[in-house]
Amino acid sequence: MRIGFDAKRAFNNHTGLGNYSRFVIEALSRTQWGSLESLLYTPKVKNLAWLNSFDHNFVIKTPSVKVGGLWRSWLINNDLKKDNVDIFHGLSNEIPFRINKSGVKSVVTIHDLIFMRYSELYPAVDRFFYQQKFRYACENADAVVAVSQQTKDDIMEFYKIPAERIRVIYQDCQSSFHQKVDNQSILTIKSKYSLNKPYIICVSSFSERKNQKRLVEAFQQLGLKDYELVLVGGKSKYADEITQNFPKNTKILYGVPSADLPALYQGASLCVYPSFFEGFGIPIIEALHSGIPVVAATGSCLEEAGGEGALYANPLDVNDLADKVRQVLTNDSLRNDLILRGKEHVKQFSAENIAGQLIKLYQEL
């Protein structure tokens, strides 16, 4: 059986969809494939370094004529047939148009439908193209992978896709978060970012949905003079809004290299992820692997990601958010219990487990 993957994000995106694509490709490469062969289809290649971290036998396929999006959305069908691909897996919310006419089976991973649930957060042109691609993929793929039960529920609600066509298969974070960082390296990273006190960490892009503003308000309300709040993300207008009324013991770290994140997590006293809606919530998984407790938000899928390794607060209630943070920081027994439960909870997201579920799905098709 030959499996083709939409690997555009794996080679050209360093954040969410790219991380998921790389995780799936690496997880499958570390699993006994038997007679399975795989091909990675991408219109261009910016980053090959990630492939060097593990043994692989993938073949990278690029278009002979540089037609970019046209190839990925339409012309790739000719290559899939020529390459005798049995199943094509769209790893980032879309599959080629008319692939169902090519004789090639298809799977699509849908990460979230936030643009449907919170349409006001997205430009109209983005919503239009997302809607065309996501709906088509869900309606025409032979199987749909949802990264959480929340996403599965949304697919059924907004696109009326039958439950039996959707498989919930979770994901893990990058393997670098699984490794214990030595104390000296943690101290070096703390010094690099001038972190001189115990700190609470929040790793997320800055946007209204991610809700960092209320986290800052909750932190101010607690008056924790012996702690710092560290927000890690990229520059944005929302980040600028937050800094207008910034308490002295709060820091924003922009452009942090991914290599620094494991030490930043492991050096923290607590991770808070207050987003009011997500497709899954990878920063929670990163924190649990890092051995620190988590406070997250109710209302979407974050309870799936954190399980019993986190406390959950109403993301719109600053008082509730502050109370949950206070509980973790002042109760050593609770803190240790959350850490132990979190380590047990994340075992289900192992690469071996996820790869096994994907291979089973491919075999069923």
Image (tube, rainbow, N blue to C red):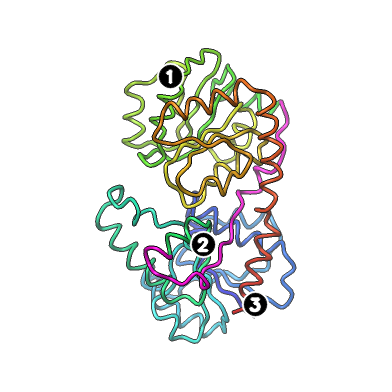
Q: Which residue is mark 1?
A: 220
Is 14 left or right of 291, judged from the image as shown? left
Residue contact between numbered discs 3 and 2, judged by CB atoms under 8 Å: no
Closest to the observer, 126 or 4: 126
Q: Residue at x 63, y 41 (%)?
A: 308
Q: Quadrant of the N terminus?
A: bottom right
Task: Kindly report which numbered mark, 3 or 1, lies closer to the viewer in this rendering.
Answer: 1
Q: Point out which mark residue 198 bears.
A: none
Q: CA distance from mark 3 to mark 2?
A: 18 Å
Task: Find numbered disc 3 in the image and state the secondary structure of the residue it sits on.
Answer: helix
Q: Residue 25's quadrant in the figure?
A: bottom right
Whole-Å distance between the Cαs marked 2 and 1? 37 Å
- Identify the residue at horizontal 60%, vertical 49% (top origin): 173
The amino acid on which the numbered mark 1 sits, given as a three-letter code, is Gln
Does 322 sit above or below residue 277? above
Residue highlighted by disc 2: 146
Q: Is residue 261 left or right of residue 291?
A: left
Residue occupied by mark 3: 363
Q: SS at mark 1? A: helix
155 vs 361: above or below: above
Vertical side of 180 occupied by 277: above or below: below
Dot 3 amino acid type = Gln
Q: Is residue 180 above or below residue 190?
A: below
Q: Residue 183 in the image: x percent, y percent?
A: 72, 27
Q: Tag 2, which secondary structure?
A: strand
Instruction: Magenta stretch: give its range.
Output: 156-183
